[in-house]
Image: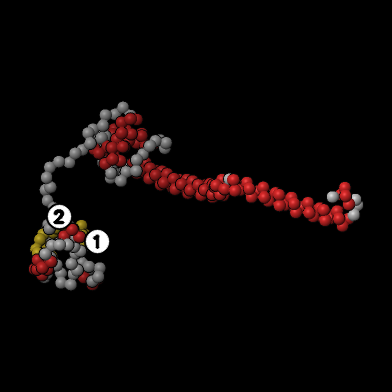
Amino acid sequence: HPDKVGDDPVKLARFHAIQEASDALTKGRADYDKSIENQELNEMVPRCYAFLVMMGYWLLHSLIDWNDVEGMRDQHKDQLRGYILNGNPLDMRALGLPDDEEGKAWLYKYCEAEDVELPVLQSDPDEIHMMRTLLSDTFPVKLRPFPQVTGKIAQQLQEIALGSKEKGENLKEINANSGFYTGYTIKVELRPSGSKKPAADPIDVEDDEEDEDEDEDKMKNQVAETTVINYLGGDKRIAMLRP
């Protein structure tokens, strides 16, 4: 101690070294005791920091996704608004408006404002009902009832493409003018030889496979004759015929 050793530099240096070592041991012990007493808290602190970072990334990506979805919705609304204002054909009966200039005027008036709500119309009845609700809530116009389809199916038709891209040589022989083959009689192979059998329904796996194979053999190389009801022609060469 300086009081005992006086000004001896060697002993003073040793005293300071011992004091520093004692302080290090004492402080280290105190920190260790503190960590033992609050072990759970000390382990939770770094986890909380990591959790906050993860929450920040999650919020950032959520905002990005929300912005993308809202941008897509706005894009669809702008496309619908432009479609209506450009005078394109619309099913006014489904919207409940008269199919005349007065009904179109109501619709144009609603769509002219860019801040109005517009549904994303995709031939979904719910979206069409939403558009009807928006119109009725905005204007004092009485909408007509939503059209209901009743009755029986008059007929069923089948579409086929004349010619085959795999056999391009026969495409040149097919007339592409609309209506050219309407009324013609056409012969169709029920199951051309070499064609693949359609995949079976998993529910019908237990059906008698022998009966199926027998029916399959009967259909092969059989030809059915039918009439072309309407020929659309064009690049796709679509013909409508009775099944």
Look at the numbered disc 1 and give the secondary structure of its residue.
Answer: loop
The C terminus, quarter of image? bottom left
Q: Decide: marks 2, 1 in contact (CB < 8 A)?
A: no
In the image, what residue type sits under mark 1?
A: Lys
| Residue 5 at x, y percent in the picture | 88, 52
Q: Position of residue 232 (x, y in %)?
A: 20, 57
Label 2 environment density (alpha carbons within 10 Å; few <14, some 14–19, many ≥20): few
Residue that lies at the very extreme toward the front in this rendered image? 4
Look at the numbered disc 2 and give the secondary structure of its residue. loop
Image coordinates of residue 186 in percent, x first then y, are 12, 63
Location of mark 2 (residue): 157
Extreme residue in the top direction: 140
Q: Earlier in the sequence, mark 2 or mark 1?
A: 2
Q: Is residue 172 above or below residue 228?
A: below
**Mark 1 Cα-neighbour bin, 10 Å: few <14, some 14–19, many ≥20:** few
**Residue 138 is drawn in which quadrant?**
top left
The percent position of residue 126, horizontal first and vertical second, equals 28, 40
Q: Which mark is residue 191?
A: none
- Tell me what residue is drawn at x 24 percent, y 61 percent: 236
Residue with the mark numbered 1: 236
Instruction: Looking at the picture, tell me which residue is in the foreground, 202 or 194.
Output: 202
- Would residue 31 be visible to someone looking at this image? yes
Q: Residue at x 29, y 35 (%)?
A: 132
Residue under the image location 91 percent in, 52 percent down: 7
Could you tell me which residue is drawn at 90 percent across and 50 percent down? 6
Camera-nearest residue between 135 and 5: 5
Q: In the rendered view, would you say 132 is above or below 155?
A: above
| Of the two numbered discs 2 and 1 in the rendering, the one whose residue sits closer to the viewer | 2
Q: Amino acid at mark 2?
A: Leu
- Is 145 placed left or right of 156 in the picture? right
Scheme by which the image is coloured: secondary structure
